[in-house]
Image (tube, grey):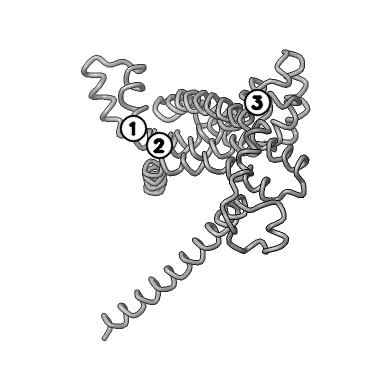
Amino acid sequence: MKAKHVTVESRLCWGLAGILSAAWVIITVFPFIFMVLNSFKEKFEILTEGVFSWPKHFYLENYITVFEKGIGRYFFNSIIVCAISLIIALLVSACAAYPISRLKFKPNQYLLLVIIACMSIPVHITLIPIFKMSKDIGLYDSIASLIGPNVAFALPISIFILTGFMAGIPRELEEAAEIDGCGRFMSFLSIIFPLTKPGLATLAIYNGVEIWNGFIFSYTLTQSPESRTLPLAIWDFQGMHSMNAPMIMAVLTITFLPMLFLFIIFQEKLMEGMTVGAVKG
């Protein structure tokens, strides 16, 4: 009787979990479907047929016009800024997390506390100093001006997470490598760094989304269209085509797709990183 009671409770729990999961999928997927479908409509079709109607035919002129208006330049700038910022942030954070997590010296815990405290610094209070600095060193209105701030704000969370990953790696691996004549630097490159790939993949997606969608730095540190990134393309196209909602939806779709592909590519590593982090915690 007790076993039957447990079975009924488990079925109810699984049923409730299934209902909540289905509701979550609908809530998260529906806006994407809504955005893509409306991007294939004509200019006034949303007004005449409604926003939730199926397109009469797949109108590709929106995407053609968007690329003719120069969204490719914004897209290229975003890829360059995101790729360089991620590479620098992940390499620097891995090099910083290694001594904090693996080497025994007294200031390391205080240093980690300082890094954690940096995570609470608001972006907006740094805009004026960063703006003046970029003007003084001649980087204003260039994509190079966006890389430094993106890296700086990605480092604290990256170092914090990678420190936890590296702290959980058995020290016996490094000791065995030292017996074979492997120094600290080679131990880091050949043992520690490869074992933190799940954490690096997780941070690549997390920081990549933040950098890709970054608006405030791009708006503050760039002025000409040649230096602006995709978030400002949405801003600019909204101004040029404020009444053309399908074209704005096309811009949003183009902006969203790279992050979707990035998640699909690194999905396995992301789930592995989240699982390992949960077990270590």
Seen as rendered, the residue at the extreme bottom is 1
Question: What is the CA distance from the residue labelled 3 to the residue labelled 2?
Answer: 28 Å
Quadrant assignment for the N terminus: bottom left
Question: What is the CA distance from the residue labelled 3 to the residue labelled 1?
Answer: 30 Å
Residue at figure coordinates x 59%, y 34% from the top left: 211
Indicate the secondary structure of the residue bearing disc 1: helix
Q: Where is residue 130 in the image (x, y as percent from the top left)?
A: 73, 24
* Residue 146: image tag: 3
Mark found first going from the N terminus, 3 or 2: 3
Residue pointed to by mark 2:
165
Question: What is the CA distance from the residue labelled 1 to the residue labelled 2?
Answer: 9 Å
Residue at figure coordinates x 65%, y 25% from the top left: 146
Task: Tell me whether the residue at label 1 lies in contact with that at label 2, contact meaning CB atoms closer than 8 angstroms.
Answer: yes
> Taking 132 as reference, is 102 left or right?
left
Q: How crowded is mark 2: few (under 14 residues within 10 Å), some or many (20 or more)?
A: many
Residue pointed to by mark 1:
195
Amino acid on which disc 2 is placed: Phe
